[in-house]
Image (cartoon, rainbow, N blue to C red):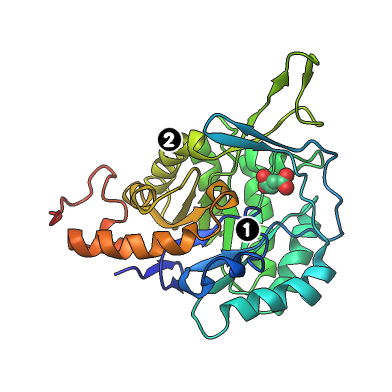
Amino acid sequence: MLTTTLGSLTLRNPVLSASGTFGSGWEGRLFADLRQVGALVSKTVTVAPRPGNPPPRIHETASGMLNSIGLENHGADHFLAETLPRMRELAADSGVRVIVNIGGESVGEFVQLAERFSAAGVDALEVNLSCPNVQEGRLLFSTDPRLTEAAVRAVKRAASVPVFAKLSPNVTDIVAIARAAEQGGADGLTAINTLIGMAIDWRRRRPVLARGIGGLSGPAIKPVALRMVYECARSVRIPVIGVGGVRSAQDVLEFVCAGASAVQVGTAQFTDPALMVRIVGELRTLLAAAGTTIRALRGSALPGAAPQELRA
Ligand code: SIN
């Protein structure tokens, strides 16, 4: 009932953690039985360690959150030695997939990361082409179809596992970028990363975040994410992973009807680290009551989808 596929990767259910909102899952294990989720997606890993941006770099907004973390992480060596074994331990014997999100400052760095993590036997790679919080060009990749295609093509050549391209909403036409990623050989798309925004402290007459701008996530962006998933799903043949503002099983099913094959839970986990697991249970109940499955619902709101009767 909950099984879904992302190209050659089968997931026991469509509920994944969103990169950067759940670490590697290690702390989350204290709150919920993570062997119930479909996949754990790591925070972005870069070749070298990164200290991230100076604080303040998180700010709560109405129905959302701004972040300007700046891809803080310990780098690939540390990830392979310390973090990946922990993710594997969390996933052991449960069918939970381990997906590593990679970030490069150049195509060469993406290739290096793809080679190393493929060799380490991760289940899939998510390529972060879309972080808005660094200056070295990641956002640039996902705002230009040619750069997107070239980066994805190079990663695909280097990788022996499925490759999902994470797209930015900060573009006029996400379909052009989605098609470029497909053309480059992506096995799937993740849509969407955060929307660039800012907050102002009027008494200080300064932006709240030290870097000025940041990425908006949370329920405020769900309608934008749904629209972009819908547009991507009706324009490409590869699977789409939806992400943006998910707080409930209902939200997951909305993304599935818009064409998502799987859905990531992000910002809501900061206040409710057991949410993913609860959503899996709620999905089971809702689908059983409606007499349908994730596969049957997928894309059912897209133009031309066959009509289907739901029980309730
Ligand atoms: C960050 O670390 O700045 C957030 C990651 C992202 O938006 O891709």
Q: Of the residues shown, which amino acid type is indicated by label 2?
A: Pro
- Residue 270 placement (x, y as % from top left): 60, 50
Q: Is mark 2 within 8 Å of ligand 1?
A: no
Task: Count numbered badges in the picture.
Answer: 2
The residue located at (65%, 62%) in the rendering is 42
Residue 144 shows in the view: no
Image position of 209 (left or right of 9): right
Cα distance between the residues tagged 2 and 1: 23 Å
Task: Specify the quadrant of the image occupied by residue 293.
Answer: bottom left
Give the camera-side residue of 5 and 181: 5
Instruction: Indicate the secondary structure of the residue bearing disc 2.
Output: helix
Q: Earlier in the sequence, mark 2 or mark 1?
A: 1
- Residue extending furthest bottom? 93
Q: Using the image, determine if residue 268 lies above or below residue 87.
A: above
- Front position in the image: 300 or 252: 252
The answer to whether any part of residue 244 appears in the image is yes
Given residues 124 and 71, the one toward you in this image is 71
**Residue 208 position within the rendered picture, expressed as x and y whole percent measured from the top left:** 75, 26
Q: Tell me the tag on residue 223.
A: 2
| Of the two numbered discs 2 and 1 in the rendering, the one whose residue sits closer to the viewer | 1
Mark 1 — residue?
22
